Structures are given as structure tokens and as C-alpha cells.
Image (tube, helix red, strand yellow):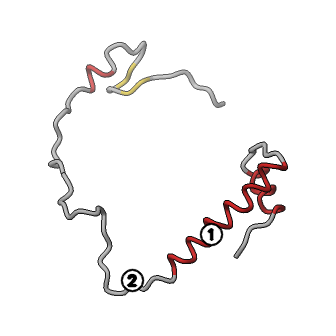
Amino acid sequence: MSVDLATVKRVARLARIAVTEEDANRMVGELNGIINFVEQLSEVDVTGVEPMTSVTPMNMRKRTDAVTDGDKADDIVANAPSTDHNFFLVPKVVE
């Protein structure tokens, strides 16, 4: 797969990026280089290789799944102009 000038201009237009003719010509070469590198990576045989999350083995830090802050509904709606059962009341905007 390769990228041509028309594709670069189309992608730039879709992304709403202003690209000069000189920049577009430069991007053709850069994008083709990136695509070629990705194609080289897809040729590597990775069967039997475990996926990694880091280059060094480590356990992920985890926090306990516990409620540490609750029963604050009254405090949250304390400054609201109008409430009902700890819900904010707002004017109706759709008829």
C-alpha cells in the first residue's frame, strides 16, 4: 500500500487541516515511510510470544475497590436553589 498526493490532500481536507502543496509533497514520502515500517513489523513472526505491558516485568499497582466517600447527597445539593429528594430541580426547557 502506498499513499499518493491526492490521498494526502483528501485526508488533510477531511481533517480540516490546511496543507500547502510543498507540505503535501513532503507528507507523501513521510507517510509512505511509516506505512513501509508498519508492513515490516507485520512480517515478524510473534507466535509464542506473550503480550507485554512493559519492557520490564512488573505487577500493576491496584487500589482496593471500596467506597471511601459517600452519604454526601445533602452536602452536594446544599447550595442548589431548588431540590427534591437530593435531586437538582431545573426549569423545563422542552415543551
Q: What whole-number distance in Å separates the C-alpha atoms at marks 2 and 1?
A: 19 Å
Residue 34, above or below 71? below
Secondary structure at badge 1 equals helix
Q: Given the image, on which type of amino acid does mark 1 rest? A: Ile
Q: Are marks 2 and 1 in contact (CB under 8 Å)?
A: no
Residue plotted at (42% across, 16% down): 82
| 87 relative to 36 in the view: left or right | left
Closer to the camera in the image, 80 or 1: 1
Task: Name the residue beneath numbered marker 2.
Answer: 46
Q: Which mark is residue 69?
A: none
* Image-quadrant location for residue 84: top left
Question: Where does the image place residue 38, in percent across and percent down from the top left?
Answer: 55, 71
Residue plotted at (32% across, 26% down): 86
Closer to the camera in the image, 94 or 14: 14
Secondary structure at badge 2 equals loop
Task: Name the residue beneath numbered marker 1.
Answer: 35
